[in-house]
Image (cartoon, rainbow, N blue to C red):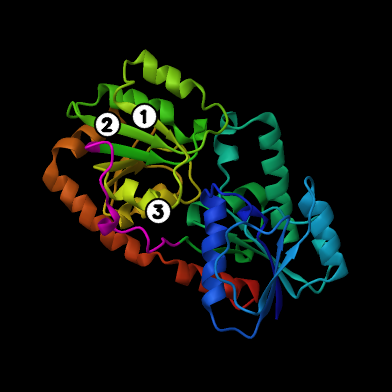
């Protein structure tokens, strides 16, 4: 088959969830011996790409705004592939008119339905419209968890047989032996975009009342998102400027060591379509505290401490125990290392390719 893949999300140096998903799936598909040929569509050639074989060609289509619905749509009209894969759910408007082109897209979460206040007005409208359109325009929709699949069916009315659940994997670069000396001797860490849905205000407040050891620090790593500005003010108000640190975006090369050196990974997010950082922390040998909502229990299984993300005392109690109870800490660490063996990018990419060519 002649397969097109939208890789436009890779044109950034700060890869978060969707960008990392696109990278990992593309990298694994690129390693597979295949009779298929591929065109990789993008606004501009990304500065970094996985090693690509000869049967993968890049098609750069320069345009700043409305790229998907104007520039990509025009290219598909001119030279449609047999199948199009869109890893980030924004599907060109004209694909239903290209009757012989199979379309597969991935929906990563529907958090905007559960917590609309965590998004701007424009984001809420855009996410609702684009997600609904993706389910109508695509032949198959990939959901990254059963929780996301259930939300898709409930919100859009898509037939259940058109949704396939394909979980994320975890990169082998996350491992316990990647730990290197850090400026902080003992710390707990959060990694992810700084936005209201991630529940970071309660995390900071929980750390303020947790009975952690005096030298235990809390590190919050991630690029600033919408409404992230009050976090530093809350840290100052609680007198935690010497113990809570906003690190900003941590490059991929430094992330495994940061996770592997932590006492715990704390992820009290209000909603996640999957929760890739949970697996990455487990793979790094770091015990996990995460919310007991959305897809997080599905991903974490019995290998994490699940907490009520709306309860500051519940989060604080988990942090206190994690800091002091070495036996429990060791048990969760071992469970996490065993849990991640079930999630690989190789399996994810293989199942994704089968969905693209219509063999699932």
Residue 329 screen position, x and y as percent:
18, 46
| Residue extending farthest top | 237
Residue 214's place in the image compared with 57, above or below, is: above
Camera-side mark, 1 or 3: 1
Camera-side mark, 3 or 2: 2
Q: Nearer the viewer, residue 71 or 161?
A: 71
Q: Which residue is mark 2?
A: 217
Q: Which residue is mark 1?
A: 245
Q: Are marks 1 and 3 in contact (CB under 8 Å)?
A: no
Helix, strand or loop status at disc 1: strand
The answer to which of marks 2 and 1 sits earlier in the sequence is 2
Describe residue 206's horizontal placement relative to residue 36 as left or right.
left
Q: Nearer the viewer, residue 309 or 159?
A: 309
Residue at 34% x, 20% y: name it: 241
Residue at 51% x, 23% y: name it: 229
Placement of the N terminus among the 4 image quadrants: bottom right
Q: Is residue 317 visible?
A: no
CA separation, marks 3 and 2?
29 Å
Total marks drawn? Answer: 3
Helix, strand or loop status at disc 3: helix
Magenta span of residues: 169-186
Residue 53 screen position, x and y as percent:
60, 77
Q: Indicate the quadrant where residue 30 lies.
A: bottom right
Q: Which residue is mark 3?
A: 298
| Residue extending farthest bottom | 35
The answer to which of marks 1 and 3 sits earlier in the sequence is 1
Describe residue 43's horizontal placement relative to residue 285 as left or right.
right
CA separation, marks 1 and 3?
30 Å
Q: Is residue 200 visible?
A: yes
């Amino acid at each position: 088959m002649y397969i097109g893949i939208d890789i436009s999300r890779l044109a950034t140096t700060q890869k978060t969830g969707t960008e990392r998903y696109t990278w990992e799936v593309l990298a694994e598909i690129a390693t597979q011996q295949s009779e298929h040929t591929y065109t990789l569509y993008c606004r501009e050639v990304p500065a970094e790409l996985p090693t690509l074989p000869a049967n993968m060609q890049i098609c750069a289509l320069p345009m700043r705004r409305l790229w998907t619905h104007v520039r990509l749509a025009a290219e598909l009209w001119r030279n449609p592939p047999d199948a199009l894969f869109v890893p980030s759910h924004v599907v060109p408007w004209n694909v239903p008119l290209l009757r012989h082109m199979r379309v597969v897209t991935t929906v990563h979460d529907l958090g905007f339905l559960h917590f609309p206040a965590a998004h701007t007005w424009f984001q809420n409208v855009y996410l609702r419209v684009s997600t609904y359109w993706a389910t109508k325009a695509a032949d198959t929709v990939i959901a990254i968890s059963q929780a996301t699949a259930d939300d898709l069916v409930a919100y859009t009315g898509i037939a259940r047989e058109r949704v396939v659940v394909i979980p994320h994997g975890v990169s082998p670069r996350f491992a316990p032996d990647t730990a290197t000396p850090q400026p902080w001797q003992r710390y707990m860490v959060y990694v992810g975009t700084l936005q209201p849905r991630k529940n970071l205000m309660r995390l900071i407040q929980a750390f303020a009342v947790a009975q952690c050891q005096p030298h235990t620090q809390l590190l919050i790593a991630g690029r600033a998102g919408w409404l992230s500005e009050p976090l530093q003010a809350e840290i100052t108000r609680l007198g935690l400027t010497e113990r809570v640190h906003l690190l900003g975006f941590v490059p991929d090369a430094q992330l495994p060591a940061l996770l592997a050196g932590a006492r715990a990974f704390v992820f009290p997010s209000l909603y996640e379509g999957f929760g890739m950082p949970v697996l990455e922390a487990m793979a790094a040998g770091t015990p996990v505290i995460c919310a007991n909502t959305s897809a997080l229990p599905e991903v974490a299984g019995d290998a994490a401490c699940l907490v009520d993300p709306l309860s500051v005392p519940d989060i604080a109690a988990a942090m206190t125990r994690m800091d002091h109870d070495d036996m429990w800490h060791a048990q969760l660490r071992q469970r996490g290392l065993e849990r991640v063996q079930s999630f690989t990018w190789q399996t994810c990419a293989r199942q994704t390719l089968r969905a693209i060519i219509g063999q699932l």
